[in-house]
Image (cartoon, coloured by chain):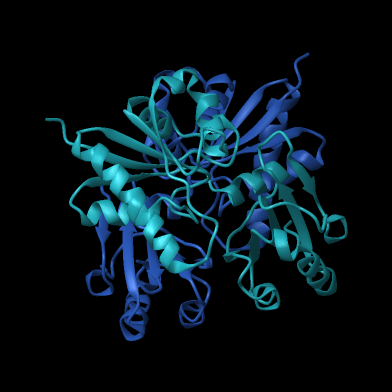
Chain colours: A cyan, B blue
Amino acid sequence: MKQGMLYGVGVGPGDPELMTLKAVRIVREADVIALPAKTKDCVAYRIAKGALEDLDEKEFLYLHMPMTKDPEILREAHDRGAEAVRELLEAGKTVAFLTLGDVTVYSTYLYLHRRLLAAGFKAELVNGIPSFCAAAARLGIGLAETKEALHVIPATYGIREALSLPGTKVLMKSGKAMGQVKRELLEAGCQVFMVENCGMENERVCRSAEDIDENAGYYSLLIVKEADHG
Amino acid sequence: MKQGMLYGVGVGPGDPELMTLKAVRIVREADVIALPAKTKDCVAYRIAKGALEDLDEKEFLYLHMPMTKDPEILREAHDRGAEAVRELLEAGKTVAFLTLGDVTVYSTYLYLHRRLLAAGFKAELVNGIPSFCAAAARLGIGLAETKEALHVIPATYGIREALSLPGTKVLMKSGKAMGQVKRELLEAGCQVFMVENCGMENERVCRSAEDIDENAGYYSLLIVKEADHG
């Protein structure tokens, strides 16, 4: 019998054309498309559908994760998800789990990867364009040049501590704390760029701390730059 | 007359299949392929050639950058490069400048981008998979999860200062100082991964500080992780 195989596939930040050739091939060849959602109505599905018209002919597996920080509830959900994938792999199927952006950066796929590898199955990571790279390209700016460091900072990191780091700072998922982040950025006098919903229909861009919308959503991303380049 | 257009195109870290659909389309549609090299014998060319067999039918422009840190010599070289591209754009040509990895991360293209935009031409950045994402995928590990920060650190940053940052550290271009970096990593007792020439024929991987080759080359990249995930 054909051996099952699991792929964690980054589909990029929104534009289907930012999928890699490999991601498109892996999705095309997969028997089952696993989604981090309750239904097909999720961003990762819509991106892949934009690159592969006949995606709906596949079998789908929905692995919704509860919105909680409770480690026990999460662990149970991860175990259940891994068990569902395991059954497909044991039946010899190829499973592609779709994830937004890149699969190595803040992806929910990795819990599956570790569990299925530990259970003796083959699993591979397939890269996608990370959201922060796409946001910089959309803005027409570099993230880091020559000697600059690049710091990608989730919302739980202290904003003042983050701003004190040398180099470019990417502030991810600041949505809930945007009001405070905006005040800190204005006080620090940084060069600030923001992209909300990068590559999607409702994309919004701003190029100064003053213009930041304090009610910006979950998929907003701030780029804080050091001095100008020549 | 057709208006000229400049694209900075990230071709990813080495595997032609890691090019995005958009990068392949832009290269296919371009009149002129600009390379950061003296001849076609460069990595970015070989990657694009792997995805586009008839690449050699294009016109080529070679924009070699001198290996110097002298800002005056660099500025002159950048000005000359921008002038060469400007002539092509004025003739109505579409120019795609190929760059390894992603175009927003340590790319030499950005000097062209700024100059040609300032001169009134249209220029766009087209993303590629950054080397550090590809290295993590090759190793089968995540770069950052949930609350972790991700720090991408060039060799000029102090290694001790870098290792004191919370989250994952990616150490880029450590080649020349690899002996010292290895000693610091061993002393700090970090979880360390290294990929040399990721996605290329001469790729090498190691999964502990002990195994780091002090003579590793320019395209080697270290990933220093915090504690294990469950």
Please give left or right for residue B228 compared with residue A54 in the image. Answer: left
x, y (%) of residue B161?
51, 81
x, y (%) of residue B122?
75, 32
Task: Please name the residue shown 27% across and 69% down the image.
Answer: B212
x, y (%) of residue B52?
43, 23
Residue sitting farthest toward the right: A210
Task: Please name the residue shown 74% across and 39% down the image.
Answer: B116
Residue sitting farthest toward the left: A1
**Residue B153 visible:** no
Residue A86 drawn above or below residue A187: above
Task: Please name the residue shown 66% across and 50% down the image.
Answer: A219
Residue sitting farthest toward the bottom: B187
Which quadrant does the N terminus of chain B fall into? top right
| Corner quadrant of residue A28 | top left
Which quadrant does the C terminus of chain B fall into? bottom left
Please give left or right for residue A62 compared with residue A195 in the image. Answer: left
Task: Please name the residue shown 78% across and 33% down the image.
Answer: B121
Please give left or right for residue B96 compared with residue B15 in the image. Answer: right
**Residue A230 visible:** yes
Task: Tell which of B16 and B218 is nearer to you.
Answer: B16
x, y (%) of residue B158?
51, 79
Please give left or right for residue A207 compared with residue B104 in the image. Answer: right
Task: Tell which of A80 and A114 is nearer to you.
Answer: A80
